[in-house]
Amino acid sequence: MFNLLVKGNGWNDSRDEMDCSRIFEYTEDYLNIRFKTNNTIDIDSLIKLPCLFMQETWHDESQQNARVGTIVSAVKSRSVIKIEYAFDNSIPPLTNNQLREVAGELGIADFEFSRTHWAIKDIDLYKVLLRYLKPRRQLPNVFTISEVEHIEPSLISVMMPFDMVFNAVHEKLKEVTSGLNLYCRRADDIWENPAIIQDVVSLIDHSKAVICDCTGRNPNVFYEIGIAHTLGRETILVTQNEHDIPFDLRHLRYVKYLNNNEGLQALGEAVSSRLRTIINA
């Protein structure tokens, strides 16, 4: 279910108003009854719905931008409802041309494109936009990733060889992330899928940042770096030997460390500094 708000002069500010007489136009009777009792509009319920903000069509429909967003607050003042709203910047602007292609799926009649009004549609707005308008990333066939990202803001993943000599490094990284109110996980902390690669990919895909230890030129770690870069994750490269950084990655900054008390302390400080930058970005 969503609100459809159409205006002649578009939506260029965070505040606007709609004449009460235009609310519930082109809205099914059962929705009118649901959100209006004794001529009183249930504003609190209405503003909980997602919104599609459209501009009336004039000449070139490709220039009329629509936005998906939410109503932050709404107050009835005499014959109008004054609203404050915000756009969802994760969804790019849509043209009226694009929306006409899915108008039937959204329950929008042709004449609604040229009429200022506020309608309620009993349609899953995001499902329709995801299916028809939002570009999908090409999905791999070796492992699976969701079409929509679900990043956990406090999750940091660590990619390193599964070898006892890296245990102290792993413990230092856990200590660092914990001190920043984050938590880090390694693939061997997880057993959710039959194939370990699926656990690795899911961990990277859900992470805010990925720490990759290139020490020893471990091919699994290099593969995981490629996955992290492809998925657009912030990646922190660390190594005990600068020659273990692949040639194609040497233009990127990395942290060199020694696997002793002083070296791990320095590693922790460097990683902590970088994570703070990522978190505050």
Image: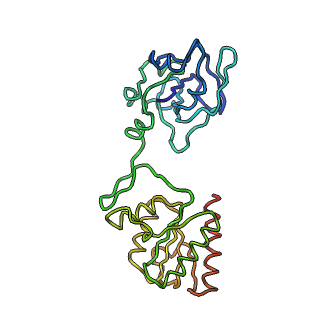
**Residue 275: image x %, image y %?**
61, 66
Query: From this viewpoint, which residue is outermost toward the right?
Result: 77
205 versus 246 height, above or below: above
Residue 143 is left or right of residue 172, and the answer is left
* Residue shown at the point (44%, 84%) measured from the top left: 216
Q: How is the image coloured?
A: rainbow
Tell which of 224 and 160 is nearer to you. 160
* Residue shown at the point (65%, 33%) measured from the top left: 14
**Residue 88: image x %, image y %?**
55, 40
Tell which of 191 and 208 is nearer to you. 191
**Residue 162: image x %, image y %?**
42, 78
Tell which of 72 and 130 is nearer to you. 72
* Residue shown at the point (62%, 86%) measured from the top left: 261
219 versus 122 height, above or below: below
Residue 100 is left or right of residue 14, and the answer is left
Quarter of the image where one finds residue 223: bottom left
Total label count?
Answer: 0
Tell which of 27 and 277 is nearer to you. 27
* Residue shown at the point (53%, 65%) measured from the top left: 156
Location of the C terminus by quadrant is bottom right
